[in-house]
Amino acid sequence: MDKNSLLLYAITDSDCIGERDFFTEVENALKGGVTILQLREKSLTTQELTEKSKKLKVVCQKYDVPLIINDDVKAAIDSGADGVHVGADDMNVSEIRNLAGNSFIIGATAKTAEQALSAQKQGADYLGCGALFTSPTKQNAKPMKVQTLKEITSAVSIPVVAIGGLSYDNIDIITDSGVAGAALISAIFAESDVKAAAERLKIKLQKMRK
């Protein structure tokens, strides 16, 4: 997977978006420069997630941005999404690869270098690693030290995305960690101007990577 497409990884959250129109705000994020989008809506059934993904796929195609579904492999495949992101308790990466084929993007969560190497061996295309800070969406997540993040990026050849409570003000923590980019939720979708928030983050991430 091209690591450039992982630079600014936006993850949806309807609670952050609130009363604003979901699809309008997602499109504003894409206009702001989001390079990959994950649909993460824990309250939806597989059928509801499939239908929402189909609509979102049309929006993402306008901006040539891959659409990833969180956890739900069936919804990802049935909706024609570009891929899925799975955690340690979800379907095994190798099983998904057998089901979905080689062109399907598979992201996996890794907390240690050992987990990262295992996911890579099974066929993951990229890794999501964190949480670097506590966040409203995952308050019980165990914080990851930057040193652990560096150990993971050094251990694997596939790209790594940092995640967990990252914002414009604290994102400098991942400088020189070897990550391809950062995954953000509230730092984009909780902002009143989603497009501007995405633009600022992308510029900062580009500078950091240089």
Image (cartoon, grey):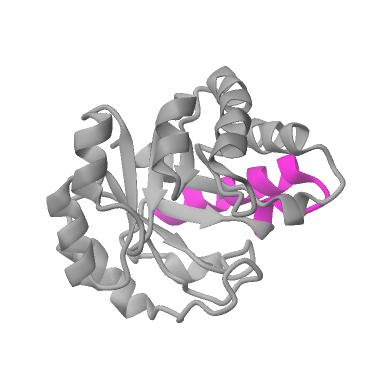
Give residue 55's position: percent from left, percent from top. 63, 24
Return the residue nearer the eye: 154 or 83.
Answer: 83
Q: Does 19 sit above or below residue 142?
A: above
Majority secondary structure of magenta residues: helix
Q: Quadrant of residue 175?
A: bottom left
In the shown orientation, is residue 194 left or right of residue 185?
right
The relative height of residue 92 versus residue 81 in the rendered view (above or below) is below
In the picture provided, is 207 more to the left or to the right than 56? Answer: left
Q: Residue 32 falls in which quadrant of the image?
A: top right
Question: Residue at the location (82% across, 37% down)?
Answer: 21
Does residue 22 appear to the left or right of 162 in the view shown? right
Residue appearing at x 38%, y 81% in the figure: 145
Q: Position of residue 14 (x, y in %)?
A: 72, 50
Task: Specify whether residue 207 is in view.
Answer: yes
The residue stretch that appears in magenta: 187-210
Residue 192 part of the magenta segment: yes
Where is residue 101 shown, x and y percent of the image? 23, 29
Q: What is the x, y in percent for residue 117?
A: 16, 61
Image quadrant assignment for residue 98: top left
The residue depicted at 42 percent of the width and 61 percent of the height is 162
